[in-house]
Image (cartoon, rainbow, N blue to C red):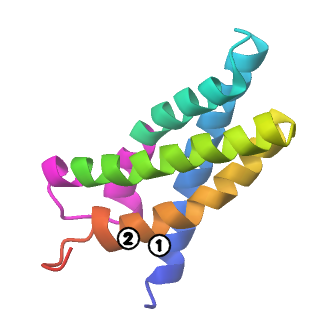
Amino acid sequence: MRHLLPQFARFVLIGGISTALQYLILAMGVEWLDADPVLASVCGFAISAVFGYVMSHRYTFASAVPHRLAVMRFCAVVGVGLLLNALLMQVLYRHLHWHYLLAQVLTTGGTMLWHFIAHRRWTFEASPQA
C-alpha cells in the first residue's frame, strides 16, 4: 500500500503526457483538418495509448508481465476506456452541446480512475490471480 501513492503519481505524470498528446491530436484534427471532434478525440486517444503502454509497462508499474500478455490486457482495458471516452464525448458534445475541449477534460477525468485501477490490478499485475 505504501507504493500506491508514488505509483499513482507516476501514473498521473505519464497520463498527463498521454493526455496532452491526445488533446494536441484532437485540437489539430478539429482546428486544422476540420475533423469531427468525436472522431478526432477517438484518434487522439488511440495514438496516445501506444505511448501510455510503453511508459506504463516500464516506468509506472515496472511490470514483469511479458509483453505478449500485457499488450493484450492493455488493449482490453484501453478498449473499454475508448468506449467510455467516445460515449462521454458523444453525450457532452453532441447532446449537451458543451465545447469540445471542456467535454474532453471531463471525459479524461471520467476515464482516469478506470485506467489506473484496471492496469494496476490486471494489465501489469504478475500475480497468479491476475
Q: Residue at x 47, y 81 (%)?
A: 4
Above or below, 84 relative to 122? above
Q: Quadrant of the C terminus?
A: bottom left
Q: Position of residue 13 (x, y in %)?
A: 58, 57
Residue furthest to the bottom? 1
- Left of 122 or right of it: where is 23? right
Q: Do the CB atoms of the residues marked 1 and 2 lie less than 8 Å apart?
A: yes
Label 2 neighbour load within 10 Å: few <14, some 14-19, many 20+: some
Q: Which mark is residue 7?
A: 1
- Left of 29 or right of it: where is 59? left
Q: Position of residue 48 (x, y in %)?
A: 50, 37
> Can you see residue 124?
no
Q: Residue at x 58, y 60 (%)?
A: 112
Above or below, 23 relative to 70? above
In magenta stretch: residue 71: no
Label 1 neighbour load within 10 Å: few <14, some 14-19, many 20+: some
Secondary structure under the numbered disc 2 in the rendered image: helix
Q: Residue at x 18, y 49 (%)?
A: 67
In magenta stretch: residue 64: yes
Cα separation between marks 1 and 2: 9 Å
Q: Which residues are magenta?
A: 51-70
The residue beneath circle 2 is: 120
Q: Position of residue 61 (x, y in %)?
A: 36, 66
Q: Label 1 amino acid? A: Gln
Q: Label 2 amino acid? A: Arg
Secondary structure under the numbered disc 1 in the rendered image: helix
Looking at the magenta stretch, what is its main secondary structure? helix
Going from the N terminus, do you reach mark 1 or mark 2 first? Answer: 1
Q: Position of residue 69 (x, y in %)?
A: 16, 53
